[in-house]
Image: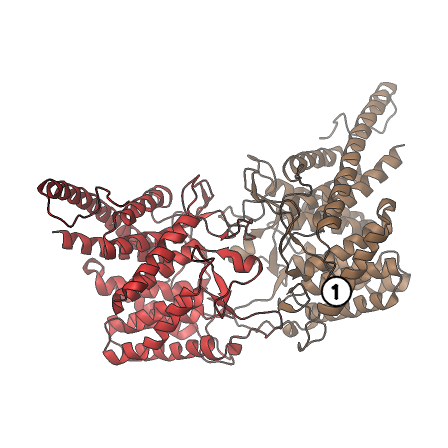
Chain colours: A brown, B red
Amino acid sequence: MEGSLLTPQSSYDPQVCIGHRIINETIQLKLKECLTHIRTQLDNVVDFWLKHSHDTVHGGFFTCLGKDGHVYDEMKYVWLQGRQVWMYCRLYRTMGRFCKPEILEAAKTGGEFLRKNARVLGSSNPWKCAFCLTRDGRAVKVQRSIFSECFYIMAMDELSRVTDDKDLQLEAEQMMEQIIYWVRVDSSGLGRPSLPGDVPTNSMAVPMMLLCLVQQLTEGREEAVTQKYKELGNWCVEQILQHIQRGGTAILENVSVNGEELPGCQGRLQNPGHALEAGWFLLQYSAMWGDDNLQKTAINKFVELPYQNGWDKKHGGLFYFLDVDHHCPTQLEWNMKLWWPHCEALIAFLMAYSQTKKPELLERFYQIYEYTFKHFPDNDSGEWYGYLTQEGKVALDFKGGPFKGFFHVPRSLFMCECILTDLLAKHN
Amino acid sequence: MEGSLLTPQSSYDPQVCIGHRIINETIQLKLKECLTHIRTQLDNVVDFWLKHSHDTVHGGFFTCLGKDGHVYDEMKYVWLQGRQVWMYCRLYRTMGRFCKPEILEAAKTGGEFLRKNARVLGSSNPWKCAFCLTRDGRAVKVQRSIFSECFYIMAMDELSRVTDDKDLQLEAEQMMEQIIYWVRVDSSGLGRPSLPGDVPTNSMAVPMMLLCLVQQLTEGREEAVTQKYKELGNWCVEQILQHIQRGGTAILENVSVNGEELPGCQGRLQNPGHALEAGWFLLQYSAMWGDDNLQKTAINKFVELPYQNGWDKKHGGLFYFLDVDHHCPTQLEWNMKLWWPHCEALIAFLMAYSQTKKPELLERFYQIYEYTFKHFPDNDSGEWYGYLTQEGKVALDFKGGPFKGFFHVPRSLFMCECILTDLLAKHN
């Protein structure tokens, strides 16, 4: 796209400048349209969850919500409880129109529910959290991974920011220490047996999630805190970059701990949504530290590549899973179009554009925007569908489920609203 | 279908008798056609696995086979290793044309691979088997359930029948004792933590699988063995019948240990393929003990109901999962058409017909037969596809994967060939 009409020119030419102003006005107009639409969508999504998801008896949130918002299952998934607390707090703290008592109240009740119930009583480790709980908070299932604990930290840290409760921040930091120990020192406490054929793996989800937590725990905090997590942040980046494989032509979801490709399906797996999410985490991190090289790698490898490899040229949308050698993935849902990779793609491309002003990144954002808003939102009953067939037909019509809560949709709309607002402010 | 032309009449009427003979000839002709087709299919499927799946270096079988049979992953899943040993032995033992040295040899090598590698070294229980192994037999993953052990038993018992190796039979019976202990006395040895919200559940898979093992261990054996497992067999039947719910209008996959419906998605889940498989297990059991009531229940509740509730009236084929209250299931693959429920349905309806001669059961068999053979077999490269979209398009094009091995397809073809041969022999 070099020399495109949309590319800013450096030398002065009155004709070009007039052309520019018009182009800039065209861009501004379109960005404003996007902003208006995204604001409305965010309002709608927040309303949906405020209306349907609160458990006023036991605290916490129902997340299994049908097409029209009815509760079809009362199970409480700790990931989704933590994410909803985080999202409510973030909206309350940073967007004036959501600074409302009912949002703060709901976040606090959710936080209390988690503090009271998430940790598994009688577990060999007092920090281990359950994966799901009954409506009244009794543990049903425990996963042998770190993610319930990660979303617990996100919830507590963000809640501490709106309530100014330092105990919550401390608890978040203590649990963070436990997670770092599990990931970097000894994972045996998670309960997975050590097996001779089970090779230690660098799975994208782990360093991504930790990098997200580093940003959560340090944002706007004093220098000492930033320094405390600096080495961890750099380690996460290094671990994420190990997923660039095949001579820089693919992001693979699982690699060896030495950054080499693993054999078989596991090693060849691509998860474009995850790569894009890692992409915008890296972009944020590169901006924080002014690291231009990292920015470039993030855009070329974690934003553009997953789009190129993951976009369905026939039906549009991002595939859920792909095999880098074009074998058929063994995941039954590999060709489905899920809401969350599209949420991540919107953030990744808009952030990449906002940092570079490269018009091709904006074009890509528009393409994903168009697919996303044409297919996912339910204009009748509100919120978004989560799971479409390859052809873009709704395959599962609920609005919330065991893995879809108040998180990816509002986070994407929130992030895009912030970036668009910022872009338009700078344009004027 | 009372009074249908296909229904046998009891009173003598020359016209009707002539009509009957013609009808019988029509039925026979069609059954013969089915038999010929099924024999050819079975030969084709056996050839495919003989050609592509044998690991001549480490023993055991590759089961991740692509569309044309190429190995796309070398992982060895214990369920599928055990099933392939069982199926080879069963074919070798009972069908003349498969009584070939290469089939026996492959079964023996598979059995040796399992005996050498399946049990997890250093595990707290010497009977616990891995879920999957590396190509050379190192444990990769252990499930906290009984199914690897169940397929180990099937393999060893059937192998003992063709090799006359009593050690294998003994090992199968010893492992069976361990499984019975886990299921009926204390499951804590399986490694699942006891959690306050985790209600003990009667999942269809468990009594079904045990009933299958009872039949495996007792078939053709002396009276003492039959008696030894009689109480267990009756217990399994009782546990399976607890899944008849909603006033007899639905088979639910998970119920409480007292046979009551469980709350939420888990409680409302229907798995028509599983119910149909349980159906023909019950039919076999009822025939063995001459239990007419059980036969009737098996047909009405476990053969006809899952068809009525599970058949896709629009696109044909059996859904994978359904919610009895018509909520959308949370399983992403709920509306896909999988090969194995259709395999089970073919056996269930043909066996139900063979035991009762009710023409409506034969009609249903033809309907499922037509859908199955139109959609699943790959006439170019052999074997069957396993996973179709709701509309019947191939969604995953491999022939073998982590859950699809040499089992459901050949078992269904084998069972149907036996039943059809028997039916036609009786007709003549």
Helix, strand or loop at label 1? It is helix
Quadrant (top left/top right/bottom left/bottom right) for the N terminus of chain B: top left
Count of marks, rendered view = 1
List x then y, in percent, for residue B394: 44, 43
Residue B353: percent from left, percent from top: 26, 53
Q: Quadrant of residue B22?
A: top left
User: Is residue A50 something that shows in the picture?
Assistant: yes
| In the foreground, B201 or B409 | B201
Query: Foreground residue, B271 or B188?
Result: B271
Query: As rendered, which of B404 and A56 lies closer to the eye?
Result: A56
Residue B112 visible in the picture: no
Give the residue drawn at x 75%, y 51%.
Answer: A282
Q: Residue furthest top?
A: A15
Residue B361 higher or lower than A128, as above or below: above
From the top left corner, tell me how far across and down residue B33 is, in percent.
21, 44
Q: Is residue A87 left or right of residue B428?
A: right
- Placement of A379 over or under B270, stated as above or below: above
Q: Which chain letter matches label 1?
A: A
- The amino acid type of the residue labelled 1 equals Phe
Question: Disc 1 designates what residue?
Answer: A113
Q: Quadrant of residue B265?
A: bottom right
Viewed as shown, does residue A22 lie left or right of B309?
right
Q: Is residue A115 above or below residue A250?
A: below
Q: Quadrant of residue B235?
A: bottom left
Tell me where residue A259 appears, x and y as whole percent.
63, 59
